[in-house]
Amino acid sequence: MMGEASKTSGELGEKLAEKLLEIIGWLGSLHNVNIPCNNEAHIGSSGNQRKSHGEDRVYIYNNPFHDDFTEVVHVSVKNNLKKYPAAQTLRTKFRSHYSDLQETIDCAVRNPEINELVSAFRGRSNVSHSGLLIWVHNDEYNVNSDIKKELSSVRLDQDDRYPVYLIDNERAGFILSVIDHVSRSSGDASFYYPQIGTSIKVAEERCGSYLPLELIASDVVLFVVEEFGRKVLYLYANQPFESEAYKKLIHYALKFSAGLVNDIKIGMPDFNVAKHDNEAKKARFSFQERKERIEPFSFKRSILNLLE
């Protein structure tokens, strides 16, 4: 029964991860890649050197925030049929998942199949390897669980070479909600990549069809939507409405848009016109010199909708 439950959990996790990655534009990723272990320091449960590492998925893209960098993302998928474990067990399991992903990337960097894949992609002059841990659960009563706060106290090895990003139920729900909302807008939408990082080329494409790691980890996701012949900037923020926070979001939106649009829409999960309209208007007064039309709105959804 335990083996059957583990198989079911793994299959559901793969299904959730596959759909989520498709939604964020990560199409064409390789899955279930076997990486022979080439480091004797990687010890398995038997106490001997591991024979191989299993890559759940590998995805490659050109980084829109850093000139001349191509990202190779190594994806590890973990799924719980029930809710996340209690805090101590949660932190212990996270360290294990994190270490496994570090070891997988360490061997994948020197793997001929992965290097052939990078060469075939014809990327940029610099190649960066990162990890993405998708760790979700299927308990509908705790569907938006946020484990990032519990994991903030986890001490990781300072010698680890590869950055690892996390998608938990809360992060997946946020991403799903914003993409679901923008897909129901009245025009064609593209992810918007603001000019942050080290990207300085004027010709660097600022819109695209995929969500980069930096925005997966961010509490702000942006889109440019063509609506009735004009471009509209949608900014989605993963935070509740509050006057000062909303004022900061207006500042970010105006800075990020850099004169690209005349219409800006700012989304928060709990914005309520009846409760917050006057506060939103007062916050807008701080930017009277700017002529852009700015409109707040609300959004919501959860990851279990992917199983429907």
Image (tube, grey):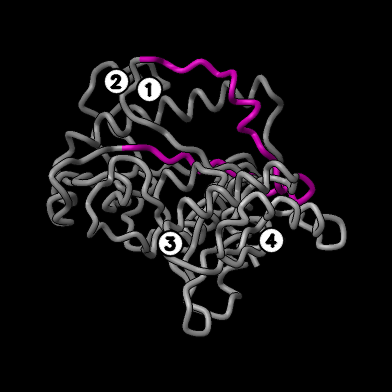
Provide residue 114's location: percent of width, then percent of height. Answer: 20, 45
Residues drawn in magenta: 130-158
* Closer mark to the observer between disc 4 and disc 2: 4
Cβ atoms under marks 3 and 2 closer than 8 Å: no
* Closer mark to the observer between disc 3 and disc 4: 3
Tell me what residue is drawn at x 62 percent, y 56 percent. Answer: 288
Provide residue 130's location: percent of width, then percent of height. Answer: 34, 37
State the residue position of label 3. Answer: 259
State the residue position of label 4. Answer: 296
How far is mark 4 from mark 2, CA to CA?
55 Å
**Amino acid of disc 2:** Gln
Q: Answer with the quarter of the image where residue 37 lies.
A: top left
- Magenta-colored stretch includes residue 268: no
Q: Is residue 241 left or right of residue 5?
A: right
How far is mark 1 from mark 3, CA to CA?
54 Å
**Amino acid of disc 1:** Gly
Q: Secondary structure at mark 1?
A: loop
How far is mark 3 from mark 2, CA to CA?
56 Å
**Amino acid of disc 3:** Gly
Q: Secondary structure at mark 3?
A: loop
Measured along the vertical axis of the image, is residue 163 above or below residue 95?
below
State the residue position of label 1. Answer: 44
Q: Quadrant of the N terminus?
A: top right
Observer-nearest residue: 161 or 234? 234
State the residue position of label 2. Answer: 49
